């Protein structure tokens, strides 16, 4: 047992000033029996269960947090708040008290936004949220997931007693879903689609488009496309030849019209076939006939050599007849014939003698017994099946003539002549004026041609390859005549590269390559005029000394001290 002498108590402080204790005083302060013991850190303190014997310093703290943590002392956070799971209090008072979970209250109540009474009632002046309620609720703006039926006695919604259905809200036209009376949740939507579906509201698709059968409306503006239209540029369409309408082919692919009018220039020759129509009612199709014999038969005309000629021709014939078969009025053996003047408007048989009679003074006269040859004195016309000899004037037809419309023919490029093909079918001209030239020979890849044809007016002229390239403003395949800047990529290797020399007083990028590609770097450039290279850093493979750097020529920054 330790013994404390009175002298040992001199240095024990009592209160604010040193005090010299007496044994009697110390004994009076100590109750019970003193002995050797330890100080152990107990519950809700840290470090818990730590022993203090005075041999070393020890700090003891209250084991407290503001969160709802089990077996911890409650301490307020920096906002003065703390959390708990179940808080049991006799009195809860204050402003803005917040209870996030179940609260059991007993005793009286306090002032503030929340008032809870021990009789099971409560008053809340702010918003209240809870997972469930029991008892009776009063007040406005009450929202609940579920309310006990006992709390809804004698309640109504829209004048309807709870437990009964609302008046039916009937779904109208072009809506989907069932009628609504409050008993079952319903969803209504507009019955719409972008497809061409009957009795549906039109809705645009994701591209803003929709389909329809027939849209009846006045169109303002011009539609870029219409599958079917009543009019085209203001005109109706019809298969009949009706004025001021658009022509439409009928079921056979035919087009009906009143007249065809062509503005194409007239031609001086005719070839191919002639167009004709049978009638203007049941068979009014325009057809083409290329059979000249059938055309002559339809036109009731003979050939140029007199073929199919017959009847009486009211034409005038000049010249001498080669023969005359007989004369009218001298069909017998009379040695003398009488010739009278007649100007009547009728056809008469001409009088002739045979070649065998020679130059006898008394010659027998003959006339054509078939009346093929005739004369009309009134109209001064002569008719015959065939005329032989030189003809002066214009014949309606001729099997062969020396001239055509007063022009002779020629296979050469002779002026004022009718062009005739030679034996090979070739046609020779000096200048050929034509709206179109149609060549039917085959196409081939011709790599060795030296003559090309081009023009700056309506005349086609020869040109060589150099002139054609110059006209087209193109270079040769080997780069001849190429100039300027070409925005193209070139593969392969260039034979030569021309490097120009310049001492311009300006800054230019330095070029460098990686592989076959040349690059420029913005941070490295030069001035040819001052022979200066600019860069942020310089790196030499050998040691740089002051003797190898001319300060008058080089401006070097950020360079370490050189030897």
Image (cartoon, grey):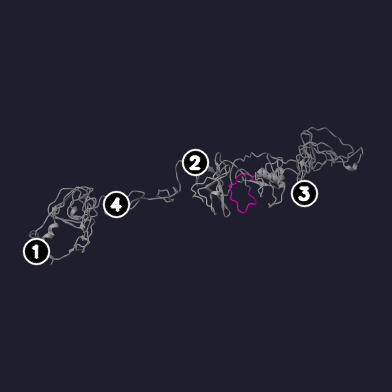
Give percent across and percent down for residue 248. Answer: 55, 45
Secondary structure beneath dot 3 equals loop
Label 3: few (<14), some or many (≥20) within 10 Å?
A: few
Q: Is label 1 in contact with label 3 (beta carbons under 8 Å)?
A: no
Between discs 3 and 2, the one toward the N terminus: 2
Q: Are marks 3 and 4 in contact (CB under 8 Å)?
A: no
Sequence-first disc among 4 and 1: 1
Q: Work out how far the residue at label 2 is from the one at label 1, CA to CA, in angstroms.
A: 116 Å
Marks 2/4: CA–CA distance: 46 Å
Residue 15: x percent and y percent?
Answer: 13, 53
**Circle 3 residue:** 424
How far from the left and from the top, in percent, is residue 132?
Answer: 21, 56
SS class of the residue under badge 2?
loop
Report the side of 156 relative to 258 (left or right).
left
Which structural element holds mark 1? loop
Q: Which mark is residue 32?
A: 1
Is the C-beta separation of discs 2 and 1 under 8 Å? no
Residue 88 in view of the camera:
yes
Would you name the residue on which mark 4 appears?
180
Q: How far apart are the two marked residues, 4 and 1, measured between alpha carbons?
A: 87 Å
State the extent of the magenta-drawn residues as a range.
482-497
Residue situated in front as seen by the camera: 210 or 53 = 53
């Amino acid at each position: 047992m330790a013994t404390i002498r009175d002298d040992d108590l001199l240095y024990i402080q009592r209160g604010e000033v040193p005090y010299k204790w007496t044994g009697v005083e110390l004994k009076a302060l100590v109750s019970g029996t003193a002995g050797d013991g330890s100080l152990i850190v107990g519950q809700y303190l840290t470090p818990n269960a730590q022993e203090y014997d005075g041999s070393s310093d020890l700090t003891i703290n209250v084991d407290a947090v503001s969160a709802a943590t089990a077996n911890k002392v409650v301490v307020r956070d920096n906002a003065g708040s703390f959390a708990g799971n179940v808080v049991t209090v006799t009195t809860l008072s204050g402003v803005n008290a917040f209870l996030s979970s179940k609260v059991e209250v007993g005793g009286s109540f306090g002032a503030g936004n929340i008032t809870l009474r021990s009789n099971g009632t409560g008053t809340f002046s702010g918003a209240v949220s809870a997972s469930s309620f029991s008892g009776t609720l009063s007040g406005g703006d009450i929202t609940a997931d579920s309310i006990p039926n006992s709390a809804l006695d004698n309640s109504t919604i829209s004048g309807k007693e709870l437990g009964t259905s609302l008046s039916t809200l009937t779904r109208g036209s072009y809506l989907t879903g069932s009628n609504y009376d409050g008993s079952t949740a319903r969803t209504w939507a507009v019955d719409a689609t972008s497809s061409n579906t009957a009795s549906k509201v039109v809705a645009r698709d994701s591209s803003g488009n929709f389909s329809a059968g027939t849209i009846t409306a006045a169109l303002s503006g011009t539609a870029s496309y219409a599958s079917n239209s009543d009019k085209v540029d203001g005109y109706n369409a019809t298969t009949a030849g009706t004025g001021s309408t658009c022509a439409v082919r009928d079921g056979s692919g035919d087009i009906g019209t009143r007249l065809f009018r062509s503005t194409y220039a007239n031609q001086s020759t005719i070839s191919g076939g002639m167009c004709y129509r049978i009638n203007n009612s049941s068979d009014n199709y325009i057809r083409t006939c290329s059979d000249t014999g059938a055309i002559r038969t339809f036109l009731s005309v003979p050939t140029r050599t007199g073929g199919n000629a017959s009847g009486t021709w009211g034409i005038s014939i000049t010249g001498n007849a080669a023969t005359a078969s007989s004369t009218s009025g001298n069909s017998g053996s009379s040695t003398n014939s009488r010739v009278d003047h007649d100007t009547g408007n009728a056809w008469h048989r001409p009088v002739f003698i045979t070649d065998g009679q020679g130059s006898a003074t008394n010659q027998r006269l003959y006339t054509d017994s078939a009346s093929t040859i005739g004369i009309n004195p009134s109209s001064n016309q002569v008719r015959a099946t065939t005329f032989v000899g030189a003809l002066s004037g214009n014949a309606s037809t001729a099997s062969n003539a020396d001239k055509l419309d007063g022009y002779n023919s020629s296979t050469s490029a002779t002026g004022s002549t009718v062009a005739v093909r030679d034996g090979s079918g070739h046609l020779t001209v000096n200048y050929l004026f034509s709206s179109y030239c149609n060549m039917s020979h085959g196409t081939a890849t011709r790599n060795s041609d030296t003559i090309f044809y081009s023009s700056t007016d309506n005349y086609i002229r020869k040109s060589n390859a150099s002139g054609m390239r110059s006209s087209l403003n193109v270079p040769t395949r080997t780069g001849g005549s190429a100039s300027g800047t070409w925005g193209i990529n070139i593969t392969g290797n260039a034979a030569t590269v021309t490097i120009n020399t310049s001492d311009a007083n300006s800054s230019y990028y330095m070029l460098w390559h990686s592989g076959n590609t040349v690059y420029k770097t913005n941070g490295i450039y030069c001035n040819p005029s001052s022979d200066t290279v600019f860069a942020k850093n310089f790196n030499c493979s050998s040691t740089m000394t002051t003797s190898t750097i001319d300060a008058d020529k080089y401006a070097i920054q950020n360079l370490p001290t050189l030897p």
